[in-house]
Amino acid sequence: MKNRVLLENYFLPGDLERQIGAFVDHYNNQRYHESLANLTPADVYYSRGAKILKMREETKKETIRNRRLQRRAAAA
């Protein structure tokens, strides 16, 4: 927040309110939090976390499987 809000000068209260609102939106909806298993607070709040983590695990397994197949094909 310090870099986004505090280092700029605001001449109208509305400008500051918009910037704080943009920061809160980013923090809650776009920024992944390590303490939340790299989910956003919105994902956890709206119970989307389990589905997202399952999709990530499936993607990871598929990636590992594809890499093994590529290595076998390269070695042959």
Image: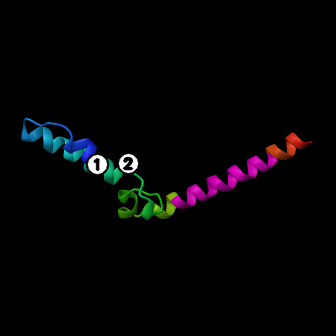
**Mark 1 is on which residue type?**
Asp
Q: Which of marks 2 and 1 is nearer the N terminus?
A: 1
Q: Residues within 10 Å of mark 1 (few under 14, many from 20)?
A: few
Q: Residue at x 81, y 47 (%)?
A: 69
Q: Residues within 10 Å of mark 2 (few under 14, many from 20)?
A: some
Which quarter of the image is occupied by the C terminus?
A: top right
Instruction: Give the extent of the magenta segment.
Output: 53-69
Q: Mark 2 points at which residue?
A: 30
Going by the picture, which residue comes out furthest to the left?
Answer: 12
Tell me: residue 53, above or below residue 75: below
Residue 24 pos. (x, y %): 26, 51
Q: Main secondary structure of the magenta part?
A: helix
Whether 59 is among the magenta residues is: yes
Residue 57, given in percent of the width and then of the height, sits at: 60, 59
Q: Mark 1 points at which residue?
A: 25
Q: Is residue 1 left or right of residue 36?
A: left
Q: Residue at x 37, y 61 (%)?
A: 46
Taking the image as shown, residue 30 lies to the left or right of residue 4, namely right
Please report contact status of discs 2 and 1: CB closer than 8 Å, yes or no: yes
x and y percentages locating residue 29 in the rendered image? 35, 51
Whether residue 73 appears in magenta in the rendering, the answer is no
Q: Return the x and y of residue 48 as percentages of the image width and height.
A: 44, 60
Q: Looking at numbered disc 2 in the image, what kind of residue is underneath it?
A: Gln
Q: Is mark 1 on a helix, strand or loop?
A: helix
**At 45% across and 60% down in the image, what residue appears?**
34
Q: Is residue 11 above or below residue 25?
A: above
- Residue 39 found in image quarter: bottom left
